[in-house]
Amino acid sequence: MSEALAKFMEKIKAKDPDQPEFHQAVYEVAESLMPFIEANPKYKKANILERMVEPERVIMFRVPWVDDKGEIHVNRAYRVQMNSAIGPYKGGMRFHRNVTLGTLKFLAFEQVFKNALTTLPMGGGKGGSDFDPIGKSEGEVMRFCQSLMMELYRHLGPNTDVPAGDIGVGAREIGFMFGAYKKIVNEWTGVFTGKGRNWGGSRIRPEATGFGVVYFAEEMLKTRGDSMEGKIVAISGFGNVAWGATRKSNDLGAKVVTLSGPDGYIYDPDGVKGEKIDFMLEMRASNRDKVQDYADKFGVQFFPGKRPWEVKADVYMPCAIQNELDINDAKNIVNNGGICVSEGANMPSTPEAVNLFIQNKLLYAPGKASNAGGVSVSGLEMTQNAMHIYWTSEEVDKQLQIIMKAIHEQCVEHGTKDGYTNYVNGSNIAGFIKVADSMIEQGPLS
Ligand code: GLU
């Protein structure tokens, strides 16, 4: 580690010692950027990186809500408005028992770079709560969402901050939050994305993140004269991202052999296809958070407490949660001859795992590049809302493919050295240039 990088990280850690995920996300970006900033003194002179790691604003508030028995609970919620240099704050809301301010700062920081890569005018933000939706009734979830919006509404707006879904927040929760927002401000406006089809939601938004992960893998494989056709794919998670990635992998002639949940993973040698893909939606709707249900229904093997990275495959798509793939998993992937890792989750691989992929010259894409399809279609949803029109599925899917290609091109342009594309460096540098230049042009107050 260079002296400049060590000093920079020391400061970040001293300021917020209890935010390890944020440190991890910043370190990965700073490591890519330090040599670039050294070579381009205008960024150093403007102290840009130090400015970018500090959120423009953090809102923290209590969310009291009443359960079905009439008991009152309280959760803590946040919105991290990280950077608005290139557009309104944009990023999802996460409801998960482990959510802390540090989690949301890491996600908001990643989002700034991701959104810059999409080519669309969106700044970065993220929000959420330590509310655990597992096992809660629909009424409880609704009352929680409504209570949360009683505070959050005043910080949002179609040109200010536009949230969306993330882990624990799907169309249902967005419906409750959007409904509350509309009631309070007495205005129909595109202030959330991921909305229902009948009320402003874009076609392809539910599929977009997973589709994008596969389009990105296809682009990476293309650089080696290869494609998804005939590939064996190991996927983790069974939620929205895993569902879209499974569908598109099937479309492109690949076979998905694993899915996972917090309880373990399933191995389906015949491939997750047809009605089995639809069953993923049922598992999610059941609110049990268990993938074993798939094994019970279709009679395939279930490996309790294990992760799918021990399975031999060609392409790996971690689509569950941060740090779900560590150095031992990465060793398994390399030893099993894996050629491509396209991340669907945000920061699913630990830094040691990422280094091993790069040392072994795998086609490895960090989430901020490969999972940007979701927020890209969110951007297209904002455009449709602003224009009061709807595009067809074909139109949106076509735009999504164009955007994923453009992200891939930016990574290749900024991350290729001696014939190998380091997508981590490429995505960090390309995203940084766009945001940093905008901040410099807008003056030192930004
Ligand atoms: N939560 C998604 C992400 O991590 C989507 C955000 C959005 O659509 O605003 O990018």
Image (cartoon, rainbow, N blue to C red):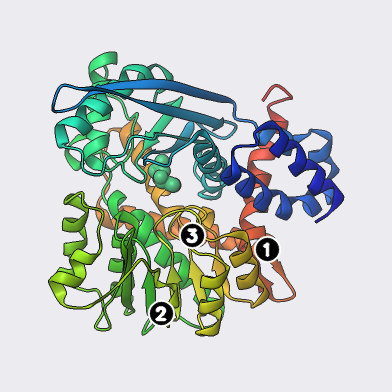
Which marked residue is nearer to the observer: mark 1 or mark 2? 2
Residue at the spot 14% in from the left edge and 28% down from the top edge: 68
The answer to whether residue 48 is above or below residue 238 is: above
Q: Which residue occupies the foreground of this view, 139 or 221?
A: 139
Which marked residue is nearer to the observer: mark 3 or mark 2? 2
Q: Which residue occupies the foreground of this view, 53 or 195?
A: 53
**What amino acid is labelled 2 in the image?**
Val
- Disc 3 versus disc 1: distance between alpha carbons? 15 Å
Where does residue 158 sit, x and y in percent of width and height? 39, 26
Mark 1 lies on a secondary structure that is helix
Crowd tier of the residue under label 3, counting other residues whose Cα lies within 10 Å: few below 14, some 14–19, many 20 or above: many
Residue 188 visible from this viewpoint: yes
**What amino acid is labelled 1 in the image?**
Gly
Mark 3 or mark 2: whose residue is earlier in sequence: 2
Q: Which residue occupies the foreground of this view, 425 or 327?
A: 327
Where does residue 193 sit, x and y in percent of width and height? 33, 38
Q: Where, by quadrant of the figure, is residue 82 drawn?
A: top right
Mark 3 or mark 1: whose residue is earlier in sequence: 3
Residue 375 visible from this viewpoint: no
Cβ of mark 2 under 8 Å from ligand 1: the answer is no
Side (left or right) of 426 relative to 218? right
Q: Quadrant of ligand 1?
A: top left
Mark 3 lies on a secondary structure that is helix
Crowd tier of the residue under label 2, counting other residues whose Cα lies within 10 Å: few below 14, some 14–19, many 20 or above: some
Where does residue 274 sit, x and y in percent of width and height? 17, 72
**Residue, disc 1:** 415
**Residue, disc 3:** 370
Q: Which label sits on residue 442?
A: none
Where does residue 404 sit, x and y in percent of width and height? 47, 59
Side (left or right) of 446 relative to 227? right
